[in-house]
Structure formats: C-alpha cells, structure tokens
Image (cartoon, rainbow, N blue to C red):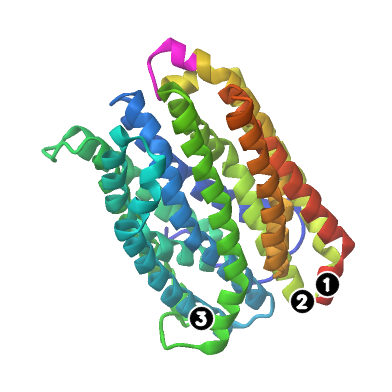
C-alpha cells in the first residue's frame, strides 16, 4: 500500500491507457463482490438444489434494497467527478458528507421495511415450503445495508477523484473474509455454529463490515482525508443534499423498478417452473456477475469520464469518449463470454456435481451470454446519460425497456408456457431497447443545452 501514490490530477483525458487506468481497478473491485455472490452460491449448492434455488429470490431481493445505495453511488460519483473537473475540493468534501448522511437514513429504512413490511408483500409469491427459510435469511442479510451503503459512498469518492486503484484493497480483504465466514458459518467449521442456509447471510454481513473498515483505513492512511478535507462536518447542507437527491432520485427509482421486475421474473419461475429451473436461473444471475465485471467497470468509467469532461467544458469530446469506452467494453465481454461457452461444464461443476444439471443449464447459458454482448454496449451509453446529469431520461429509458420486458415475460412464461431457455431471451430485448433510446438521445445533443 505504501507504494501507491495519490493522484493529484483531477482532470481526465481521452486515451485507451487513461480509460483503462480508471476501468481496470474498478474491474478488479467488481470481481470481488461477484466472488462473494458466487462463493455463497457454491457453498449453498452443496446443501442442495433447493437451497441454491432459494438463494435466487433472496439474492434478487437484497439487490433491490442494495441498489438504492448504488443509485446514490452513481449520483455522487457523477457530482464528485464534475467537481473534480472544476478543481472544487470543498465541493467534493460537502458532497461526500451529505452522501453519508443520506445513505445511512435510507439504510435504516431498508432494514425496517425488510423486517416488518416485506414479508407481507412476498408471502403470496413464495412457495409455503420455502417462505420461512427465505424471510429469515433476509432479516439477517439486511443488516449489511449500512456497511454496504457507506462502502459505496467511499467507492464513489475514490472513483470520482480518479483514485480508483485503491478500490482493490478493500475488496480483496472483503472477498477473503466472505470465503472464510461462509466456510465457517454454513458448515460449522473452525468451532463456529453450523447455521446452514442462514450462515451465508451472517458471512456476507460480516464481510461487508470488514470491507468498509478497510476502505476507511485506506482513506486515512493515504492522506485522502486531509487532502480533500473529509469528515469535518456532517451538518445538513441544503444545496449539496438537493443536488444528490435530484440526480439520484431517478436513478434509485430506475434501479428499484428494474430489479423489482427481475424479482417478479424469479417469482414467475418459482410458480411455473421446476426446482432445477430455479437453481439454473440463480446460476444465470451469477453469470451476469462474472461476465458483467468488465462491462460494469467500463460503464462506471463512462459515467466518470463524461462528468469530468463536462466539468472541464469539453462537451464536444463526450461522444468520442463514449465510443472508445464502448469498444473496450464489447471486446472484454466477448472474451468472458467465450471462456464460459468453451468451458461450461467446468463452470457449472462449481455449483453442482450432478452432470444432468450442467446439461440442462448449458443451453440457457448460451442465450444469457449472447444477451451480455448487448449489455456491454447498452450500459456504456446508459451510464453516459448518468454522467450528463440527465437522470430523468435514464428513468424514461428504463421504464420503456421494462414495459417491453414484462410483456415478453408474460407471453413466454404465462401465455405460451415456453421453456426456461425462452424466458431468459428477455435480456436481449431489454438491452436492445436501453441502447437504442440512450444512443438516440446522446447523439441528438439536447443534453448539452440542459447541463
């Protein structure tokens, strides 16, 4: 850690090397939370296909409450990047303090909602044999929200100030902690209690707390706290708070709607398909995590670079930057998709030793990885929209894509009762709509008049 120096230049410039200097540390950081998700599912898969399938709905629900923090993360990252482009150190400090205040308030709301309201909403949609297990898991898992949200605020600060290379430190420790805690609490190793399915929830909460502690240590240890005058005051600042909420509100709503739709998709699988289909679909969610590592890193880079270029007054270079990032994103996704399709049995063996499981899952994986190629392009353009600050357009794009997504799901799963292979074809439709509308809006150029 001592060999890593703090970045003193807060302005981006467009080159593959600079794009990669931002994206690769984010990529490495994203690998680790996906390791957490996959580790949980690998261990739960050893308990049985039922537990692996139940982890699908609980995982998607937690993603829904988690993306509230992700919405604040993206908004804060965009605003901090803009301030960095303007060399506004004081603005960065205020934004982070207000982001912390807001995120903690929403974390408390998420915990209370999950404990006292969510069970009533979920009960009609979950099989009675699975309900108690899944709700008990969520009531434990949700206590990770405060740590996760604060962790995301720290990440937004590091990426927005072009210090993304520090991300890997916290995530490495978090991933190792999650593996250790999973092994300990699920199976009762190292003298720990054997909690089975719930052990994965305890493990994830503890790992998120460890990750936050490491990020705070890095911020203090590398002098970032002093340089950016961080944590001096958490007093309510109306202007900064309104800026964060104005940019984040459409993003939060967009993410909640998007993942709620995904939750409905998993509920429809539970109601109309087999336990094996549920388990396969949960593994597909992990494939999105694995294949999407580079994709989301480049998408985050798109947000940061667009915001920073606008802060510098270089709006004419925005589209050029997006295209460069898009090509790198697409290329990285092709590599990941090829690896999964060349060695599918090796991948599925991680989750189940039953050869018939891999045989049933491979056709679904072919469709999902094709959808990821569409995603690799669409997310770059969608996050570029976020970087312009026009997050209301993001919400409109999301709503349009989701409407078509839901119509497709209803027809395939309820009207025609087609196989799980057809059900996962929804991703190609969804990302095609996202790209088409985002591309049209950014190319049209009206966003330049609204900055």
In this rendered view, identify the residue nearer to me: 285 or 224: 285
| Mark 2 residue element | loop
Which of the 4 quarters of the picture holds residue 59?
top left
Whole-angstrom CA distance, mark 1 to mark 3, is: 27 Å
Query: Horizontally, is 174 left or right of 391 in the view?
Result: left
Question: Mark number for residue 451?
Answer: 2
Give the magenta part as a residue range: 350-358
| Mark 1 residue element | helix
In this rendered view, identify the residue nearer to me: 122 or 223: 122
Q: Are marks 3 and 2 in contact (CB under 8 Å)?
A: no
Task: Provide residue 239's location: percent of width, then percent of height.
Answer: 57, 87
Query: Which mark is first along the chain, 3 or 1?
Result: 3
Q: Residue at x 61, y 76 (%)?
A: 246
Whole-angstrom CA distance, mark 3 to mark 2, is: 22 Å
Image quadrant in which the N terminus is located? bottom left
Residue located beneath label 3 in the image: 93
Q: Residue at x 69, y 67 (%)?
A: 392
Task: Provide residue 204's location: percent of width, then percent of height.
Answer: 32, 48
Which of the 4 quarters of the picture holds residue 305?
bottom right
Task: Provide residue 256's location: percent of width, then percent of height.
Answer: 53, 56
- Asked if residue 203 can be seen in this view, the reply is no
Q: Nearer the viewer, mark 1 or mark 3?
A: 1
Q: Are marks 1 and 2 in contact (CB under 8 Å)?
A: yes
Mark 3: few/some/many CA within 10 Å (<14, 14-19, 20+):
many
Residue located beneath label 1 in the image: 448
Whole-angstrom CA distance, mark 1 to mark 2, is: 6 Å
């Amino acid at each position: 850690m001592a060999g890593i120096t703090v970045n003193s230049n807060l302005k981006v410039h467009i080159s593959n090397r600079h794009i990669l200097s931002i994206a690769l540390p984010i990529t490495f950081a994203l690998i680790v939370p996906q390791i957490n998700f996959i580790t949980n599912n690998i261990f739960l898969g050893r308990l049985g296909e039922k537990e692996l399938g139940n982890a699908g709905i609980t995982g998607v629900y937690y993603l829904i409450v988690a993306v509230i923090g992700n919405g604040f993360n993206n908004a804060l990252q965009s605003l901090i990047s803009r301030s960095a482009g303007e060399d506004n150190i004081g603005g960065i400090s205020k934004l982070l303090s207000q982001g912390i205040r807001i995120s903690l308030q929403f974390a408390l709301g998420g915990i209370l909602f999950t404990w006292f309201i969510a069970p009533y909403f979920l009960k009609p949609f979950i099989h009675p044999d699975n309900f108690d297990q899944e709700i008990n898991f969520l009531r434990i898992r949700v206590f990770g929200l405060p740590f996760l949200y604060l962790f995301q605020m720290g990440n937004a600060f590091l990426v927005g100030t072009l210090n993304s290379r520090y991300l890997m430190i916290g995530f490495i420790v978090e991933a190792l902690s999650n593996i250790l805690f999973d092994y300990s609490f699920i199976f009762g190793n190292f003298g720990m209690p054997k909690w089975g399915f719930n052990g994965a929830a305890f493990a994830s909460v503890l790992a998120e707390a460890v990750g936050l502690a490491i990020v705070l240590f890095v911020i203090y240890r590398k002098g970032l706290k002093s340089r950016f005058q961080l944590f001096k005051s958490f007093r309510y600042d109306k202007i900064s708070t309104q800026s964060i909420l104005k940019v984040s509100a459409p993003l939060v709503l967009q993410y909640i709607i998007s993942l709620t739709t995904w939750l409905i998709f998993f509920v429809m699988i539970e109601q109309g398909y087999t336990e094996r289909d549920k388990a396969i679909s949960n593994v597909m969610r992990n494939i999105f995590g694995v294949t999407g590592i580079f994709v989301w890193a480049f998408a985050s880079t798109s947000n940061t670079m667009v915001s920073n270029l606008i802060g510098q007054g270089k709006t004419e270079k925005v589209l050029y930057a997006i295209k460069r990032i898009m090509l790198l994103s697409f290329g990285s996704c092709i590599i990941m998709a090829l690896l999964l399709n060349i060695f599918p049995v090796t991948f599925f063996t991680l989750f189940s030793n039953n050869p018939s499981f891999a045989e049933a899952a491979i056709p679904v994986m072919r469709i999902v990885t094709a959808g990821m190629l569409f995603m690799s392009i669409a997310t770059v353009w969608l996050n570029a929209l976020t970087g312009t600050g026009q997050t209301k357009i993001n919400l409109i794009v999301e709503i349009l894509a989701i409407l078509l997504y839901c119509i497709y799901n209803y027809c395939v799963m309820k009207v025609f009762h087609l196989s799980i292979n057809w059900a996962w074809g929804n991703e190609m439709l969804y990302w095609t709509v996202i790209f088409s509308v985002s591309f049209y809006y950014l190319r049209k150029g009206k966003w330049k008049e609204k900055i």
